[in-house]
Image (cartoon, rainbow, N blue to C red):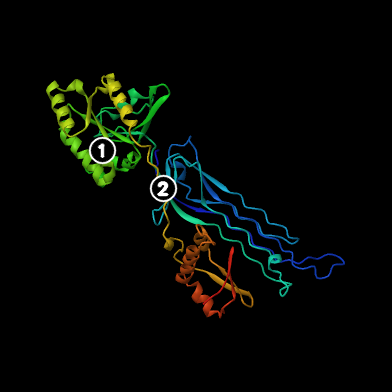
Amino acid sequence: MFVDIAKITVKAGDGGAGAVAFHREKYIASGGPDGGDGGRGGDVVFVVDDNLATLADFRYKRKYAAKNGLPGEGGRKHGKNGESLEIRVPRGTIIKEADSGAVMADMSKTERFVAAKGGNGGWGNCHFATPTRQAPRFAKPGVPGEEWDISLELKLLADVGLLGYPSVGKSSLISVVSQAKPKIADYHFTTLTPNLGVVYMGDDNSFVIADIPGLIEGAGEGVGLGHEFLKHIERCRLLVHIVDVSGFEGRNPKDDFIKINEELVKFNPELAERPQIVAGNKIDMAEPKQIEDFKNWVENRGYEYYSICAPIKEGTAELMNAVWKKLQTLPPIKEYEAEEIPPENFIKDDGGFKITEPEKGYFVVEAKWFPRVLRGLDTDDYESLQYMQRVLEKSGVFNALRSKGIQEGDTVSIYDIEFEYVP
């Protein structure tokens, strides 16, 4: 089964808690704090697997979690790091943050992408010893691993996309110009899934062509099967529009051409601007006058036109040569840039947090959503710090600290970050 959309939840491992421990050894009194740090949580990593062609593996498993780091131990022993989790996806998969739809990564040329970073381990109490605090009886908890609701969308990587109504000969064409073997029959919607084929042009030159299931009027609004696969031609550099020039099924080839292009505009206006070459198929069933009339009509609209009879390869070589020549003038296959995830998506609906005061003037804030804020934060950048301050104010953390009696100069600790409170 061809599956090209999936929604999953990924959870990186939590960092292990730091240990509260004191050195104990014979003949050594008051050995001091020696609690070790917790281990780092494992990451969730997406990896391209060229042996995969669909997202079918995600139909039944929706939650993926990496291992947590282990707690630290006495004797300054560091907890074991959690094992990372690798998730394999087909090349061409777009990874998006589900709520906002922001692109996190395009797995076209990127081979590995860390979607959720594991939390750092908490500090053991040995880090908190000072001349005035010689026996700290607290440690830091581990940082929670990032958690994201993610949507996966597979967009095929093809240089050329074949367009047209059902049964106009798209599958026949791809079967004779490449090694692809799609199902071919004389009824509509024979092709239910996209097919990819490689067209070899000699001298180690080739391009990838995609046979997209037939479109019908209304496809851009969800009618028929083709609307589900229009996204697979969004990356294509060139479109080959195949039309039944004979009108054998009672349709007018000019109307077919106009209607399919209208569906492209409805789905994505950029697609309608994509270069097109028109192929008039089934010329063996058409009158010469029909072919000439359609050819003139298409060329008057500014398109290149080629007559073909796909099953017997008539005109197909000329068409592929024209396609190859046109591809040399076009930019590479489209890649999607990573986008910024809106700040409100960092804070989940509960917006929950916990504040403790293990020692006078030292406030510890725990919030599972905070690692999301830290994801792109540069603590040396003033604007980044201002952004973090706005998030803490908006989430109610500062109001809660004030209600607990925090004073100017007190320390606020939020996982890996500590700062002095300034009203």
Q: Residue 59's x, y, as percent?
A: 44, 45
What residue would you read off at disc 1? 215
Q: Mark 1 and mark 2: span between their CA atoms?
A: 29 Å
The kind of residue on which mark 1 rests is Leu
**Residue displayed at 49% across by 76% down:** 399
**Residue displayed at 55% across by 70% down:** 354
Residue 49: mark in rendering: none
**Camera-side residue of 388 and 72:** 388
Q: How many marks can you see? A: 2
What residue would you read off at disc 2? 337
The kind of residue on which mark 2 rests is Glu
Secondary element under disc 1, as helix, strand or loop, is loop
**Camera-side residue of 5 and 278:** 278
Few, some or many residues within 10 Å of mark 1 (<14, 14–19, 20+): many
Residue 223 visible in the current orientation: no
Few, some or many residues within 10 Å of mark 2 (<14, 14–19, 20+): few
Q: Residue 133's x, y, as percent?
A: 71, 74
**Residue displayed at 19% across by 39% down:** 259
Q: Quadrant of residue 413?
A: bottom right
**Camera-side residue of 280 and 11:** 280
Left or right relative to 114: residue 306: left
Left or right relative to 379: residue 253: left
Q: Residue furthest right?
A: 27
Q: Quadrant of residue 258?
A: top left
Left or right relative to 326: residue 16: right
User: Is the residue 87 above or below the residue 374 in the image?
Assistant: above
Residue 411 visible in the current orientation: yes
Secondary element under disc 2, as helix, strand or loop, is loop
Q: Residue 185's x, y, as percent?
A: 29, 27
